[in-house]
C-alpha cells in the first residue's frame, strides 16, 4: 500500500511538472516571451512577375510623350500607361463617335490619384521632387506589370485603402516585382 501511494504521488507530481514547464520556461527567458510568434507582417505583400519595359520606352519619342513635372522618363511611362490601359470602341457601328474603355479601372484610377497627390505634395513642399519621382516611377512600374495578371486581391487592397498615403505605400512598399 505504501509503494502504490508513493507511485501515485510520483505520477501526480510528474503530470503537474509538465503543466508548469511552460511557465518555468517563460520565467527563465522573459525577453523571448515578448517577441511575436511569427515574422509575418501585418499587411500582406503582393508579388508579381515583372518584365523590362526598355524597348517600349525607347520607342516613345519626346514629342509623343510631351513633358511631365517628374521628368522625361515619367512622361514616357505615362504615355505608355495611357496606351496600355485605355482603348477606344465605337458607340454604335457606323457612328464615328467612340468611347474610352479602361482596363483594370481600379488600378488606373489609383495611379491617377497618386500622381495628383504627388504633384500637389511637391508643389506644397511636403515631398521633394526626387522622392516623388522615385515613388511615382515605382507606381508606374507596378501598373505596367500587373496589367496582364490576376490582381483581384490587389484591387481589393486598393479599394480598402482609406487615404492616399496608404495607397501610395501599397504600390511602393507592399508590392514586390520579381524580374
Image: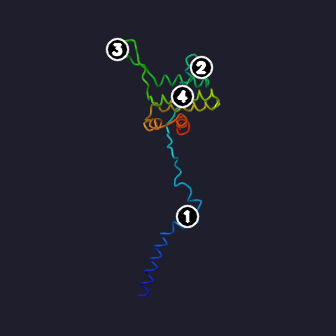
Of pointers 2 and 4, the one earlier in the residue sequence: 4
The residue where tag 4 is placed is 53
Residue at 49% across, 23% down? 82
Of pointers 2 and 1, the one earlier in the residue sequence: 1
Task: State the CA–CA distance, disc 4 to disc 3.
Answer: 35 Å
Closest to the observer, 39 or 73: 39
Number of the label disc, if any, that sits on residue 101:
none
Task: State the CA–CA distance, disc 2 to disc 4.
Answer: 19 Å
The residue where tag 3 is placed is 93
User: Mark 3 against mark 1, which lies toward the viewer?
Assistant: 1
- Say whether marks 2 and 4 touch (CB < 8 Å): no
Residue at 61% across, 23% down? 69
Task: State the CA–CA distance, disc 1 to disc 4.
Answer: 53 Å
Number of the label disc, if any, that sits on residue 67:
2
Task: State the CA–CA distance, disc 3 to disc 2.
Answer: 36 Å
- Say whether marks 4 and 3 touch (CB < 8 Å): no
Task: State the CA–CA distance, disc 2 to disc 1.
Answer: 62 Å
Number of the label disc, if any, that sits on residue 26:
1
Amino acid at each position: 500500500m505504501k509503494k502504490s501511494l508513493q507511485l501515485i504521488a510520483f505520477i501526480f507530481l510528474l503530470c503537474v511538472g509538465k503543466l508548469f514547464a511552460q511557465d518555468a520556461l517563460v520565467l527563465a527567458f522573459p525577453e523571448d516571451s515578448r517577441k511575436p510568434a511569427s515574422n509575418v507582417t501585418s499587411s500582406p505583400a503582393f508579388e508579381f512577375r515583372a518584365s523590362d519595359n526598355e524597348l517600349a520606352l525607347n520607342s516613345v519619342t519626346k514629342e509623343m510623350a510631351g513633358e511631365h513635372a517628374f521628368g522625361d522618363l515619367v512622361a514616357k511611362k505615362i504615355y505608355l500607361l495611357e496606351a496600355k490601359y485605355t482603348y477606344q470602341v465605337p458607340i454604335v457601328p457606323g457612328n464615328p463617335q467612340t468611347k474610352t474603355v479602361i482596363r483594370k479601372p481600379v488600378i488606373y484610377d489609383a495611379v491617377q490619384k497618386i500622381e495628383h497627390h504627388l504633384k500637389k505634395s511637391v508643389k506644397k513642399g511636403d515631398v521633394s521632387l526626387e522622392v516623388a519621382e522615385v515613388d511615382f516611377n515605382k507606381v508606374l512600374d507596378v501598373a505596367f506589370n500587373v496589367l496582364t495578371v490576376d490582381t483581384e486581391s490587389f484591387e481589393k487592397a486598393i479599394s480598402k485603402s482609406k487615404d492616399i498615403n496608404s495607397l501610395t505605400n501599397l504600390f511602393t512598399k507592399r508590392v514586390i516585382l520579381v524580374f
